[in-house]
Image (cartoon, grey):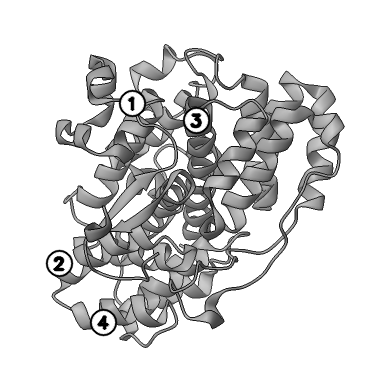
Amino acid sequence: MTLDIPDSASTSGAAGTADVIDLLAGITPGSSLDRLRHRRPGAREHAQRSFDALFAPDAETEVTLVERNAIAAFVTGLHRDAPAAGFYAERLAGLAPGLSAAVRAEVEAGAATGPYGVYPPGVAAPGESAEGPRYRTGDPGALGARLTAAFEHAHLLVFRPREASREALDALRRAGWSSTGIVTLSQLVAFLSFQVRVAAGLRLLGAAA
Amino acid sequence: MTGFTREQLGWTPWLEPLAADELTDEHREALVDRARAASPYFRLLARDPRILHARTVTDNDIFHNADGGLPRAERELAATATSRRNGCVFCASVHARFAAHHSRRPGDVQRLLDEGVHAWQDDRWRAIIDASAALTATPGELTVGHLAALRAAGLDDLEISDVINAAAFFNWANRLMLSLGEPVKEEDR
């Protein structure tokens, strides 16, 4: 536990108990990385508030906690960042142990190296477009329709965001995602893409000091 | 669809934003800057106000906190390189303008847009762009070699952490802009 946890975190439920980026990067109070993060206090506090907003939401009306944590375990698994992937896999195992094996299998099936993807005509030199896997879930029965669509969309956003499209949002709608739910899903995948990278970068900076 | 450019682009959503007269006090607070109520992008994100607010304050501190660290121009350079690598034409246009303005090096920024992250740059910009692009890869490709190159270019640890924050943040911003709508040329609006 660090000293600069915002008071508001304690009101946001069980998720707001420790700074997750510090945890994932191995930052301890008083360390040089801790002092570096204190120089950007707004970013530090609000990265954590972002985590709280997504993982201790006021309501589960649009996206359930199980869905949020299953998507997080999938997204961080695809990043192959062991601390983050372990953190979210453990949360999912606590909430929905029956889903853990299915999510692990999808992480393996979805393994890729990005960013890749084909640009629309005229955006970049043709040589810059790079084909790559367009993942479809291996076991839609185990995930259910909403998570199947969410995983396919999350894989698109993780690896080939340049191929995002109106049609991709239509697929989410057909699986029961509302406009507000899609905004939250996009924020979830996008925020995790940030959180994993900050933690990995700081972890490396600490190790290289 | 336009190519990578420093020109002013518009952005059109694929989902219905909240209407201006639907915005409650909570939505307006989440926008942080009230002028953003005019933006369809921010009114769309206002559908989930808590994460919008936290996202926006994170963004502001990473790019505008002037308590030492990396010059604004180079935080914007990291944002531009990340956006160029991911393929976010809209984000790249905005932050290329900022990078060009604050650095007074529009030619070098334009080369990054035209030729991509591997285009020639001087040693300092090379190190910042390479680190940003490596952090943008999935799985991550940032190594101690990238950090050594940043140190050799004169960056201290606070400045390096600013590069990490700026590039990481644009992996958030790019995925929002790319997934929820598309850029349009201003004259097409």
Q: Which residue lies under the disc numbered 2?
A: B102
> Which comes sooner in the sequence, label 2 or label 1?
1
Between B118 and A119, which is closer to the camera in this rendering? A119
The residue indicated by pointer 1 is B18
Q: Are marks 2 and 1 on the same chain?
A: yes
Relative side of B79 to B141, left or right: left
The answer to which quarter of the image holds residue B126 is bottom left
Q: Quadrant of residue B188?
A: bottom left
**Viewer-nearest of discs 2 and 1:** 1
Q: Nearer the viewer, mark 3 or mark 4?
A: 3
Q: Check the image and report above or below for B7 versus B123.
A: above
Q: Amino acid at mark 3?
A: Thr
As measured in the structure, the alpha-carbon distance from the residue carrying label 2 to the one carrying label 3 is 33 Å
Q: Secondary structure at mark 1?
A: loop
Q: Which of these two is toward me, B19 or B4? A: B19
Give coordinates of residue B135: x percent, y percent.
50, 62
Q: Residue under circle 3?
A: A184
Is disc 4 placed on a helix, strand or loop?
helix
